[in-house]
């Protein structure tokens, strides 16, 4: 695998990235009005959140990164 060819520093970085990604919580699905979308059982629908890595890599400031990741708090 690719991990076998990684240096110790690269492996540490990969593990840190994997831990960060695994910490993501599922996103609530909402309609255009902002109301929760329900599944067939009437439970709130949750999905994995996708990150636009091209947009993220183009961020020029921490504020832009937070906006891209949806971590800006009102």
Image: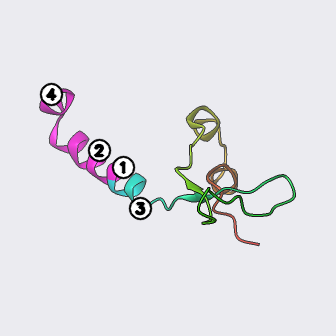
Q: CA distance from mark 2 to mark 3?
A: 14 Å
Q: Magenta stretch containing residue 54, yes or no?
A: no
Q: CA distance from mark 2 to mark 4?
A: 13 Å
Q: Disc number at residue 14?
A: 2
Q: Magenta stretch containing residue 8, yes or no?
A: yes
Q: State the image quarter where residue 57 is shown.
A: top right
Among all residues in the image, which is located at the extreme right?
A: 33
Among all residues in the image, which is located at the extreme left?
A: 4
User: Which is more foreground, mark 1 or mark 3?
Assistant: 3
Q: CA distance from mark 1 to mark 2?
A: 5 Å
Residue bearing mark 1: 17
Q: State the image quarter where residue 27 is shown.
A: bottom right
Residue bearing mark 4: 5
Q: CA distance from mark 3 to mark 4?
A: 26 Å
Asked whether the beta carbons under mark 3 and mark 4 sit within 8 Å of each other, the answer is no
Residue bearing mark 3: 23
Can you say whether 62 is above or below 11 in the image?
Answer: below
Query: Which corner quadrant holds the N terminus?
Result: top left
Q: Residues within 10 Å of mark 1 (few under 14, many from 20)?
A: few
Label 4 residue SS: helix
Q: Is residue 12 left or right of residue 68?
A: left
Q: Residues within 10 Å of mark 3 (few under 14, many from 20)?
A: few
Q: Earlier in the sequence, mark 3 or mark 4?
A: 4
Q: Is residue 2 left or right of residue 45?
A: left
Q: Residues within 10 Å of mark 4 (few under 14, many from 20)?
A: few
The location of residue 47, given as percent across then percent down, is 55, 52
Please provide the residue range marked out in magenta: 1-18
Q: CA distance from mark 1 to mark 4?
A: 17 Å
Label 2 residue SS: helix
Can you say whether 55 is above or below 5 in the image?
Answer: below
Q: Is residue 18 left or right of residue 45?
A: left
């Amino acid at each position: 695998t690719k991990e076998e060819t990684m240096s110790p520093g690269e492996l540490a970085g990969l593990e840190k990235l994997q831990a960060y990604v695994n910490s993501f919580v599922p996103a609530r699905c909402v309609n255009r009005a902002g109301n929760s979308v329900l599944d067939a059982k009437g439970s709130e629908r949750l999905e994995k959140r996708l990150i636009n890595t091209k947009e993220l890599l183009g961020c020029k400031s921490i504020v832009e990164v937070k906006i891209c990741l949806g971590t800006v708090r009102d």
